[in-house]
Image (cartoon, helix red, strand yellow):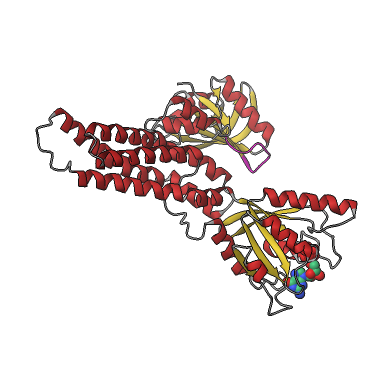
Amino acid sequence: MSTIAAISTGMAAGGIGIVRISGENAIKIADSIFSSVSGKKIADIPGYCALYGKAVDGGDVLDTVIALLFRAPKSYTGEDVVEISCHGGLYVTKRVLRAALSAGAVPAQAGEFTKRAFLNGKMDLTGAESVMNIISAQGEEAEKIALGILEGGLFKEIKKISDKLLYDMALLSAWVDYPYEEIEELSSENLGGDIRFAVKSLEKLINNYDAGKIIIEGVDAAIVGKPNVGKSTLMNLLSGTDRSIVTEIEGTTRDIVEDTVTLGGVVLRLSDTAGVRQTDDAVESIGVERAVKRLENAQLVLAVFDASRPLSDDDRRLISLCRGKRAIGIINKTDLVKNYLTDELKDNFEKLVFISAKTGEGKDDLTNAVESVLGTANFDPGVAALINERQLGCCKDALKALNEAEDALFSGLTMDAVTVCLDSAVENLLALTGEKATESVVNEIFAHFCVGK
Ligand code: GDP
């Protein structure tokens, strides 16, 4: 296999820039572009050791650098890896990379380091997939899920199921070969019990998928309401800044203000929209139109009402726009009024929250309502979770095959029929972990990685 090289740090000026070289000639290539202060060669030092020196390209000195060696198989890729840490300027890091390429390395493809790690058995396919999630994680919970998978949480969960089924299939094939022998463990109860266990485990993973996806990806949330109900004040409360303009003049937020906040472990990409009301003002009406569009496209709507005023036609229009959406009704300015009539709102929102955006009272109730409406309240990021559609698809196909196996078992079909269904279930589980994934699936997964990872 060729020796690959790439810049593994971000493509911007930074504290350090790292050129990573991996493959059987990594040490030789690194030694040809590096000269240590001590005179030692990289080839002479043990793994996990570093040398200080200069990166060179022919007669040119490029930078003072550190060369860090990982010897196969104890490296990220499982191959010999040398990481050259330069001063973080992009130009100099690129020059060091160019020197490595002139010395015989080939440019790494997107995700190629991680792909090699997978192919060399350093991680299973779910772990490899989680690497990208770790890079892009925006919140603590999302990071926790991805790290759990990288450490083998999902792999172990799936393996527990597939090992049980593989054992049963071995018993079934022994029975097919020697039908007159008694195989004690191969009773309908035992087999049915194992299938049930597999069905339950997969159903749990599948049912948790949406909540996990919300935690990993976050949601687009729109704050909507007629002018002056306190949308901007709420936005500022949630984001902890004064980005939205708060005034008593109606129609002040004429376009959309955006910010990202974390509420109850969920990242909300919040947009504070123009007040939704009937208006003759041309500029304001463009803002209103955009607000309505935002509402329609949002994955979560925070519909704000003013506790100090009776519901108006604009409020009622908003209520009807929220129908069929995942929406929370927020009754704001509770510091002004204690007894607010909520029947009309109660009938129209799955969750109602009383809040004073000005004092912050009720913010915890809003957090709970968000978790409850998004279904993330009971989600435990510490347990195994599926993180993408590919994994979900494999689980669903395996579950379908297991349901068919159960039907075949209890409707008195031959054991051959049960075996065929179990075989299909196991195939899907092995595809999920990568133990039996096709080359095109593997290529497709790594094509979405960044270069250098
Ligand atoms: P928006 O037009 O819906 O964005 O409303 P703003 O956030 O600009 O608020 C309009 C007015 O209501 C401002 O004077 C705010 O200070 C006031 N306001 C907002 N929230 C509260 C609240 O919880 N209590 C009280 N008493 N006033 C509030």
Q: Can residue 123 be seen here?
A: no
The stretch in magenta equals: 8-16
Instruction: Verify whether residue 58 appears in magenta.
Output: no
Q: Reply above or below: 368 against 197.
A: below
Main SS, magenta residues: loop
Q: Position of residue 167 (x, y in %)?
A: 23, 38
Q: Which residue is located at x 25 percent, y 45 percent?
A: 192
Residue 406 image-quadrant placement: top left
**Which residue is at a point 69% across and 69% down the rendered structure image?**
331
With respect to residue 303, does 176 lie above or below? above
Left or right of 86, for residue 48: left
Percent across and percent down for residue 55 are 59, 30
**Quarter holding the C terminus?**
top right
Left/right of residue 286 with respect to residue 80 in the rendered view: right
- Residue depicted at 63% across the width and 51% down the height: 299
Q: Quadrant of the N terminus?
A: top left
In front of the other: 63 or 21: 21
Q: Quadrant of residue 428?
A: top left
